[in-house]
Image (cartoon, rainbow, N blue to C red):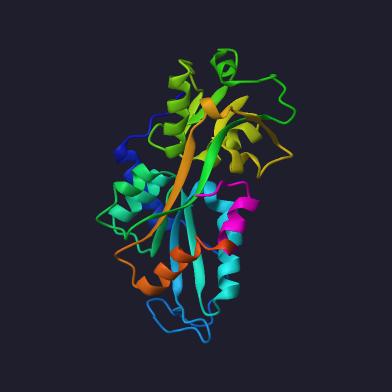
Amino acid sequence: MSFTFTRRHVTAAAAAVALLVPLTACGGDDSKDTSGAQATESGTGAPKANLTVLAASSLTDVFKQAGAAYEKAHPGTKITFSFAGSQELAAQVEQGAPADALVTADTKTMDGLGSDTGTPSIIAKNRLVIATGEGNPEKIDELKDLADTKLKVVLAAPEVPVGRYSKKILDAQKITVKPVSQEPNVRAVLSKVELGEADAGLVYKTDAATAPDKVDAVEIPDAQNAIASYPAATLKTSKNSAAAEAFVKWLSTPEAQKIFQDAGFQKP
């Protein structure tokens, strides 16, 4: 069955996420609430604070590593991440969800929030692969194989960045795919393949790499592929603007870039 996600549905879902879903923290328990504080860390010159960062689902694993590294290098700062599809994050920002920075999986979503953010900077890039079951039991070798109506193919919804990238590359090759479902983020697509509920799905290379024992990744040639860019920006409503800016700038440092590239992301 195919599911269509309208703007109204996405906004409602985002509101629920913002209100009900606990965020993922990198650090340990708070011994003292420093939210809103702009105190300066001893010896670093960077302000310390409790930061909330809204981030695209495809950054889940790498940001947990990056957040831990940042906290270690900046004592007194704690980073809490909230991961979701970029379109859901945009809805949260538009509704005033309390957060300090935003990282999306495409520039289109970020550009649409220009009045809510500082100047964005690209911190990483990614590319698509075809995720199949372990061992690639259906012998899928290239994009055109996804047109086989006997295959259960799952894609992200067209409102989602990875869904738009998927549509772009399939349309460019004049390949018609009728997905069994359209998911709200790339991790949901990957999960369908991992669980055997789909034979294949289009995901980012880095997402497929997080499940090497459950899925195989079929490479897509550069000429047929799309490159995803990840912009990061501070939010104008942040109560920790200096600390948020310091974190966003850090994402472009050699230390942070090594973490991204070790996880399979491309250079900005």
Direction from residue 223 to residue 4 in the image, left or right = left
Q: Nearer the viewer, residue 229 or 135?
A: 229
Residue 209 visible somewhere in the drawing? yes
- Residue located 72% across and 31% down the image: 134
Residue 240 visible somewhere in the drawing? no
Q: Is residue 149 above or below residue 41?
A: above
Direction from residue 20 to residue 197 in the image, left or right = right
Q: Is residue 257 magenta?
A: yes
Q: Nearer the viewer, residue 1 or 124?
A: 124
- Residue located 75% across and 28% down the image: 135
Number of numbered labels in the structure image: 0
- Residue located 56% across and 46% down the image: 266
Q: Is residue 266 magenta?
A: yes
Percent across and percent down for residue 197 are 61, 28
The magenta segment: 255-268
Q: Nearer the viewer, residue 80 or 167?
A: 167
Percent across and percent down for residue 58 are 53, 46
Q: Is residue 70 above or below residue 128?
A: below
Q: Nearer the viewer, residue 167 or 179?
A: 167
Residue at the farthest bottom position: 42
Direction from residue 21 to residue 193 in the image, left or right = right
Percent across and percent down for residue 249 are 45, 65
- Residue located 35% across and 64% down the image: 98
Residue at the farthest top position: 149
Q: Is residue 4 above or below residue 149?
A: below
Percent across and percent down for residue 183 are 48, 34
